[in-house]
Image (tube, rainbow, N blue to C red):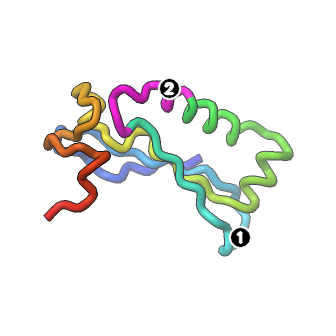
Amino acid sequence: MRVKYLGATPLKKIVTLLQIYSESEDRNKKAIVVMGRQHAGETPSSFVLQSIIEELLSATQENEFLLAKYNFYIFPMVNVDGVSLGNYRCNFFGFDLNRCWQVE
Protein backbone atom coordinates (compact mmCIF):
# COMPACT_ATOMS: atom_id res chain seq x y z
CA MET A 1 0.00 0.00 0.00
CA ARG A 2 1.18 3.48 -0.80
CA VAL A 3 -0.13 6.61 0.93
CA LYS A 4 -0.11 9.73 -1.24
CA TYR A 5 -0.70 13.21 0.07
CA LEU A 6 -2.73 15.07 -2.54
CA GLY A 7 -2.60 18.48 -0.90
CA ALA A 8 -4.20 20.56 1.80
CA THR A 9 -7.76 21.80 2.22
CA PRO A 10 -8.70 25.44 2.87
CA LEU A 11 -8.54 24.60 6.61
CA LYS A 12 -5.03 23.15 6.08
CA LYS A 13 -6.12 19.54 6.58
CA ILE A 14 -4.37 16.84 4.57
CA VAL A 15 -6.17 15.04 1.73
CA THR A 16 -4.93 11.47 1.34
CA LEU A 17 -5.14 8.78 -1.28
CA LEU A 18 -4.36 5.15 -0.49
CA GLN A 19 -3.15 3.01 -3.37
CA ILE A 20 -3.31 -0.76 -3.01
CA TYR A 21 -1.82 -2.73 -5.87
CA SER A 22 0.49 -5.58 -6.72
CA GLU A 23 3.91 -5.10 -8.23
CA SER A 24 2.92 -6.81 -11.48
CA GLU A 25 4.01 -5.22 -14.74
CA ASP A 26 0.55 -5.44 -16.31
CA ARG A 27 -0.14 -1.96 -17.71
CA ASN A 28 -3.72 -2.91 -18.66
CA LYS A 29 -4.96 -3.29 -15.11
CA LYS A 30 -8.25 -1.58 -14.42
CA ALA A 31 -8.77 0.85 -11.55
CA ILE A 32 -11.29 0.56 -8.76
CA VAL A 33 -11.92 3.84 -6.94
CA VAL A 34 -13.52 3.81 -3.49
CA MET A 35 -14.51 7.04 -1.74
CA GLY A 36 -15.66 7.56 1.81
CA ARG A 37 -16.91 10.25 4.16
CA GLN A 38 -18.36 12.84 1.83
CA HIS A 39 -20.78 13.80 4.61
CA ALA A 40 -20.22 14.02 8.36
CA GLY A 41 -23.08 11.61 9.08
CA GLU A 42 -21.62 8.81 6.99
CA THR A 43 -19.65 7.27 9.83
CA PRO A 44 -20.43 3.69 8.71
CA SER A 45 -18.34 4.32 5.58
CA SER A 46 -15.24 4.66 7.77
CA PHE A 47 -15.80 1.16 9.13
CA VAL A 48 -16.49 -0.21 5.65
CA LEU A 49 -13.30 1.35 4.25
CA GLN A 50 -11.26 0.02 7.16
CA SER A 51 -12.55 -3.49 6.44
CA ILE A 52 -11.86 -3.14 2.71
CA ILE A 53 -8.29 -2.01 3.38
CA GLU A 54 -7.62 -4.75 5.91
CA GLU A 55 -9.04 -7.37 3.57
CA LEU A 56 -7.05 -6.20 0.53
CA LEU A 57 -3.85 -6.21 2.57
CA SER A 58 -4.36 -9.73 3.90
CA ALA A 59 -2.51 -12.52 2.14
CA THR A 60 -5.16 -14.67 0.50
CA GLN A 61 -5.50 -16.22 -2.94
CA GLU A 62 -8.60 -14.12 -3.59
CA ASN A 63 -6.72 -10.91 -2.88
CA GLU A 64 -3.76 -11.94 -5.00
CA PHE A 65 -6.21 -12.54 -7.85
CA LEU A 66 -7.88 -9.13 -7.32
CA LEU A 67 -4.60 -7.23 -7.07
CA ALA A 68 -3.24 -8.94 -10.17
CA LYS A 69 -6.17 -7.55 -12.18
CA TYR A 70 -7.00 -4.25 -10.45
CA ASN A 71 -5.37 -1.25 -8.82
CA PHE A 72 -7.37 0.12 -5.89
CA TYR A 73 -7.49 3.86 -5.21
CA ILE A 74 -9.11 4.68 -1.89
CA PHE A 75 -10.03 8.19 -0.75
CA PRO A 76 -10.84 7.77 2.96
CA MET A 77 -12.45 11.20 3.23
CA VAL A 78 -13.38 13.36 0.23
CA ASN A 79 -14.86 16.26 2.23
CA VAL A 80 -12.23 16.63 4.92
CA ASP A 81 -13.14 20.18 6.01
CA GLY A 82 -16.91 19.63 5.91
CA VAL A 83 -16.71 16.41 7.90
CA SER A 84 -14.35 17.90 10.49
CA LEU A 85 -16.74 20.84 10.96
CA GLY A 86 -19.72 18.49 11.29
CA ASN A 87 -21.42 19.85 8.16
CA TYR A 88 -23.87 17.17 7.17
CA ARG A 89 -24.05 17.88 3.43
CA CYS A 90 -21.89 20.94 2.82
CA ASN A 91 -18.22 21.55 2.35
CA PHE A 92 -16.24 24.37 4.00
CA PHE A 93 -17.67 26.92 1.55
CA GLY A 94 -21.28 25.92 2.22
CA PHE A 95 -21.85 24.11 -1.07
CA ASP A 96 -24.20 21.13 -0.88
CA LEU A 97 -22.03 18.37 -2.37
CA ASN A 98 -25.10 16.44 -3.48
CA ARG A 99 -26.37 19.37 -5.58
CA CYS A 100 -23.38 21.51 -6.62
CA TRP A 101 -21.38 19.70 -9.28
CA GLN A 102 -20.07 22.65 -11.24
CA VAL A 103 -18.42 25.77 -9.86
CA GLU A 104 -18.72 28.81 -12.10
Q: Where does the C terminus fall, quadrant-wise? A: bottom left
- Where residue 81 appears, as percent x and y from the top left, is 24, 36
- Relative vertical location of residue 83 with respect to residue 74 in this rendering, above or below: above
Q: What stretch is highlighted in magenta?
A: 38-47
Identify whether 88 is placed above or below 57: above
Q: Mark 2 points at which residue?
A: 44
Q: Residue 25 carries which label?
A: 1
- From this view, report whether residue 26 is shown above or below residue 23: below
Is 39 colored magenta in this rendering?
yes
Q: Is mark 2 on a helix, strand or loop?
A: helix
Residue at 79% x, 50% y is 64
Q: Is residue 44 left or right of residue 52?
A: left
Depth check: 76 or 96 in front? 96
Tell me what residue is drawn at x 24 percent, y 30 percent: 87
Say what amino acid the circle numbered 2 marks: Pro
Q: Which residue is drawn at 27% across and 57% down?
A: 101
Q: Name the residue rendered at 59%, 47% in the picture.
A: 1
Farthest residue in the front direction?
99
Q: Nearer the viewer, mark 1 or mark 2?
A: 2
Whole-percent x and y of residue 90? 23, 38
Front position in the image: 36 or 63:
36
